[in-house]
Image (cartoon, helix red, strand yellow):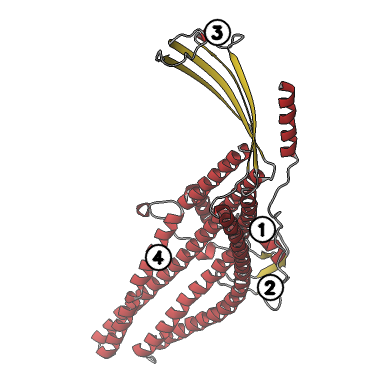
Amino acid sequence: MRRRSARMVASLLCAGAAGCTVGPNFQRPPPPSSAVYAPGQPPAEVSAVQGVAGGQAQRLVQDRMVDAQWWRAFGSPGLDAMVDEALKANPDLQSAEAALRQAQALMKAQAGAQLPTADLSYQVQRAQNSAAIAPVLADNSNLYTLHTAQLTVAYALDVFGGLRRQTEAATAQAEAARLQYAAARSVLIANVAAAAIQSAALARQVQAARLTAEDVRQALALLRKRAELGEIAQIDVAAQETLLAQAEQALPPLLKALAQQQSALAVLLGRESGQGAPAPLDLDALTLPAELPVSSPAALVRQRPDVAAAEANLHAASAGVGVAVAARLPSFTLGAAAGGASTQLRDLLASGDTFWTLSAGVTQPIFRGGELKARQQAAQAAFDGAKAQYRSTVLNALKNVADSLDALQRDDDVLQAVAAAEAAGRRSLALARASRDMGEVGPLEMLGAQQTYDQTRSALAQASAARFADTAALYQALGAGA
């Protein structure tokens, strides 16, 4: 009997090892059919604007690998320090890292479910049976102490691959968590860069507004002296006072925007708002990368972590269909137990006090009220949804790159126009001041020249920052920093 039991166990083990795996085998989605991001190839070069922050020329290099530490190409130790701090202290990134560790632990737990289980137990029992009940012990004692130790081994034969599909799904979910962490890292780096650049632009605008107010204030002092001497009328002084009020009025909104941007940057760095953020960067100290990598659409879907995470979720959903199919098929189990029972602990494993059992079983679901069929339908629907979500993620990734490439070209056009306007406004203001000193231009003409220059100077700071910000956006769109 023992030999027959051993042969039966060996046969079932072989059946489990050679069993099929039901459900669809995952097929990686095909790459995008288009080789470009938008109709017409992107420009090969973004031209330079001399003497302006963010005016360096940039060349787009096709099919080049993206530098993982792309932010260092801006040449700013301050920005490097901010990114390093954010990667260490940002709570959202820490949450994503914890989710990754959780998914990896669940994957290991699920993999362990495919292996046999072994449990060792010990029990001691003190009892007295009624005289009307047949004695439990061989010596017919009614009062006794019974020691029992037992080793139980169980194994679920994965004949139809349900457990393997569960492990496959857990592995894909762990991979999705890893890629979601990489995506969160990429987004965090880009957000820190964007916030730091925007703070630098606002700081430049605040500086310009203060310089404008100081210039107007000095001019007002001169006009008041001339009015006291009777050289000009009080209406000219009033016009200059209006100009000063307008210059001072422009400062508080800029300071408010800068404070809010600095608070947002502090949160990205993992700091409390009361701790503040590092001082704004100097926009002139930043440099643009001379060469920008542009991956092909086929390479993009492999290197962008959010697209790869969507693919991993699709893989997990595919395996889920197999799990649901296997749940409707027979399940096979093997079991074995061995141990000893004795009234004396020292005789627990003595000859004659030991026992053992071997078992094998099969279970075929017959009636579950439509539950198992509905679960399979739900798994198929989840797979279809994951497929659509993957497609949506790919489309948005391609759009991000297309938008970033277009923005870089538009930024170049805007920066050139604004730089020309700022230079013209600066010359116009200088001429107006010279004419004013000679008595040829009144305060009203000065008011118009000053306002025009102020507007172009603020627009130049914004246009310069846009070049830096959209360069960072292109790196993020390409999946850099993951």
Name the residue tied to disc 4.
258
Question: Do the residues bearing badges 4 and 3 touch, measured as CB atoms within 8 Å?
Answer: no
Q: Position of residue 101 (x, y in %)?
A: 54, 43
Left or right position of 206 against 75? left
Residue at x-position 42% and y-position 88%: 435
User: Distance between the Cα atoms at labels 1 and 2?
Assistant: 24 Å
Q: Earlier in the sequence, mark 4 or mark 3?
A: 4
The one nearer the camera, 391 or 410, is 391
Identity of the amino acid at label 3?
Answer: Asp
Name the residue tied to disc 3.
347
Which quarter of the image is occupied by the N terminus? top right
Q: Position of residue 295 (x, y in %)?
A: 69, 64
Name the residue tied to disc 2.
45
Which quarter of the image is occupied by the C terminus? bottom right
Identity of the amino acid at label 4?
Answer: Leu
Left or right position of 199 against 406? left
Residue at x-position 40% and y-position 87%: 448
Name the residue tied to disc 1.
303
Residue at x-position 62% and y-position 69%: 395
- Determine whether 151 is above or below 63 in the image: above
- Determine whether 107 is above or below 257 in the image: above
Identity of the amino acid at label 2?
Answer: Glu
Question: Do the residues bearing badges 4 and 1 touch, measured as CB atoms within 8 Å?
Answer: no
Q: Earlier in the sequence, mark 1 or mark 2?
A: 2
Q: Residue furthest left?
A: 228
